[in-house]
């Protein structure tokens, strides 16, 4: 199992895997044809900016049932655009001494378990100062019905493509996913 998804992985293994993942992401941003960076910025690009790895922002959590209706409509970075998601559950954890909760979403594909990944958009107290103002994302592989432990690792938090310019429509975190604490882990504001 990938250390990033393994609740029992050592901190050292997770940190190594995080660094490797960041290097792959930097390479994709610089070289891939579908990079969100405008072509005129790719040559000078030296890498994304991240907070240092911090194991305090890696939580082993259980996916609890949704507290309300299963369908959630979220706004996007485009004024007249919205996306429909299903609530797959809620993750509860304590960060900076504060009890927090985040909804895990899946695209509304017509069936509750159709999507293979869980989408966790969030906004925290660093938004607009140290991190992208609209929020950041986590993406987790959905586990089997008999496996309810997930790794919610904010060191894996990434900016939506909208943070880099271009003509993207990026979902905004729902009100339930606005955290009152700073999460100084994962991707920072992009360099301009």
Image: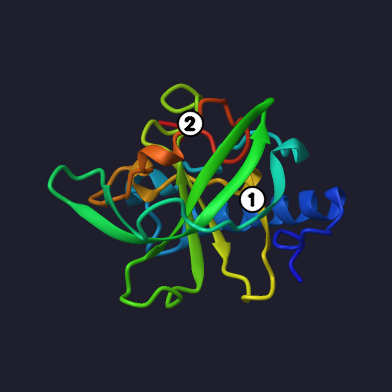
**Which residue is more in the foreground, 190 or 146?**
146
Q: In screen coordinates, is 114 left or right of 22?
A: left
Quarter occupied by the C terminus = top left
Judge depth for marks 2 and 1 and give the one in front: 1
Residue 56 % position (x, y): 75, 36
| Circle on res. 131 | 2
* Location of residue 94 (image quadrant): top right
Q: Which residue is painted at 49% across and 43% down in the image?
A: 45
Q: Which residue is painted at 77% across and 58% down in the image?
A: 7
**Which residue is more in the foreground, 143 or 66?**
66
Q: How many marks?
A: 2
**Which residue is more in the foreground, 47 or 110?**
110
Residue 35 in the image: above or below residue 2: above
Residue 156 in the image: above or below residue 96: below
Residue 134 % position (x, y): 36, 36
Q: Earlier in the sequence, mark 2 or mark 1?
A: 2
Residue 124 in the image: above or below residue 91: above
**Which residue is more in the foreground, 47 or 157?**
157
Q: How was the colour assigned to the protein in this rendering?
A: rainbow
Residue 59 % position (x, y): 71, 46
Secondary structure, mark 2, is loop
In three-dimensional space, the C-alpha distance between marks 2 and 1, rounded to whole angstroms, equals 18 Å
Secondary structure, mark 1, is strand
Q: Residues within 10 Å of mark 1 (few under 14, many from 20)?
A: many
Q: Which residue is painted at 26% across and 52% down in the image?
A: 168
Q: Which residue is mark 1?
A: 152
Q: Residues within 10 Å of mark 2 (few under 14, many from 20)?
A: many
Quarter occupied by the N terminus = bottom right
Residue 157 visible to an observer of this rendering: yes
């Amino acid at each position: 199992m990938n250390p990033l998804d393994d609740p029992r992985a050592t901190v050292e293994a997770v940190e190594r895997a995080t660094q490797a993942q960041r290097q792959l992401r930097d390479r994709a941003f610089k070289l891939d044809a579908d990079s969100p960076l405008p072509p005129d910025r790719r040559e000078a690009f030296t890498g994304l900016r991240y907070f240092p790895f911090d194991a305090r922002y890696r939580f082993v959590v259980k996916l609890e049932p949704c507290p309300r209706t299963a369908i959630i409509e979220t706004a996007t970075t485009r004024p007249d655009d919205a996306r429909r998601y299903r609530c797959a559950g809620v993750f509860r954890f304590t960060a900076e001494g504060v009890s927090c909760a985040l909804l895990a979403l899946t695209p509304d594909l017509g069936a509750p378990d159709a999507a293979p990944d869980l989408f966790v958009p969030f906004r925290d107290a660093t938004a607009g100062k140290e991190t992208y103002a609209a929020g950041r994302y986590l993406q987790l592989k959905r586990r089997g019905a008999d496996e309810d432990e997930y790794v919610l690792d904010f060191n894996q938090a990434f900016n939506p493509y909208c943070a880099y310019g271009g003509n993207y429509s990026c979902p905004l975190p729902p009100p339930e996913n606005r955290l009152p604490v700073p999460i100084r882990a994962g991707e920072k504001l992009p360099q301009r």
